[in-house]
Image (spheres, rainbow, N blue to C red):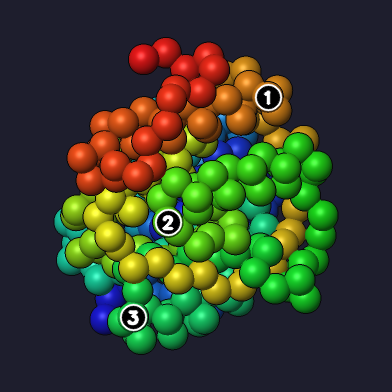
Amino acid sequence: MRILVAIPVFNEQKHVSRVLSRVREHADDVLIIDDGSTDETPEILNRLRNPLRLDLIRHEANAGYGRSLREAFRRAADRDFDWVITMDCDEQHEPEALPRFFERCRAGESDIISGSRYLHESERDGSPPADRRAINATITEELNERLGLALTDGFCGYKAHRVGALRELELTENGYAFPMQFWVQAAAASLRVEEIPVSLIYNDPNRSFGGGLDVPDVRLDHYRCVMHKEIERLADRLPDARRPAPAGCPG
């Protein structure tokens, strides 16, 4: 079984060396997607690329978190990997959790193995900003109610994806609303989903989402709108998920 670990990176000069060194202790195949970093991240990656045997995709300009994930999925499919695990590069996703993901991949019981920071209270190592936790809880509840899922953490980016299952999806979202489109399509494709606990770590409570999404109400409305449009697009496969458009969501 071949497993690719894919890590989107944007301006992570503070963390990238430590994260990649720790990841290489567990993973044979590592892909970095540098999403147009403007700090010293590109130079650090150039120094690390050969010693750590890293595969690298570099964007000339920032294209978005969702775009980076879609490119990771494409690379995994093109190079015949069985699974692709996505994780962040800001030391909020612990590389030491990778063996747990590997174990669940090898079990072959699921198509998506999603990390959850809220599955077990004992796993919590920090407190998220109140607005992020509230939006996560609200959106996770709506995803479960509308799509028949049983998630405890709808936004954790630490995930293992079976590459064969990803071929059933048609993902186009480039930004931070990517999970909305992803979960709707996963439900429409009847993918098997399980969660495993990961630590709750927040190193940067002031991270910007860009494009006006730093305002919590704007961000929540955006997520709901992306979810609504994707459900409407797949309405024939998700008839029980349909609802009127949320306020501020154009038809």
Q: Which residue is mark 3?
A: 109
Q: Residue at x 47, y 76 (%)?
A: 101
Residue 73, given in percent of the width and then of the height, sits at: 30, 53
Q: Which residue is mark 1?
A: 217
- Name the foreground residue: 135 vs 22: 135
- Decide: is 161 above or below 142: below
Mark nearest the camera among 1 and 2 is 2
The answer to whether any part of residue 84 appears in the image is no
> Which quadrant is home to the C terminus?
top left
Secondary structure category for the residue under label 1? helix
- Decide: is 231 above or below 83: above
Q: Which residue is mark 2?
A: 148
Q: Residue at x 55, y 73 (%)?
A: 196
Q: Which is nearer the N-term, disc 1 or disc 2?
A: 2
Q: Residue at x 53, y 14 (%)?
A: 248
Q: Residue at x 40, y 67 (%)?
A: 193
How crowded is the residue under tag 2: few (<14 C-alpha within 10 Å), some, or many (20+)?
few
Q: Which mark is residue 64?
A: none
Residue 189, given in percent of the width and then of the height, sits at: 25, 55
Position of residue 93 in the picture relative to residue 101 (left or right): right
Tell me the amino acid under the disc marked 3.
Glu
Residue 192, given in percent of the width and then of the height, sits at: 34, 68
As measured in the structure, the alpha-carbon distance from the residue carrying label 1 to the one carrying label 2 is: 25 Å
- Name the foreground residue: 70 vs 250: 250
> Marks 3 and 2: in contact by CB < 8 Å?
no
Secondary structure category for the residue under label 3? loop
In terms of image quadrants, where is residue 244? Answer: top left
The answer to whether any part of residue 98 appears in the image is yes
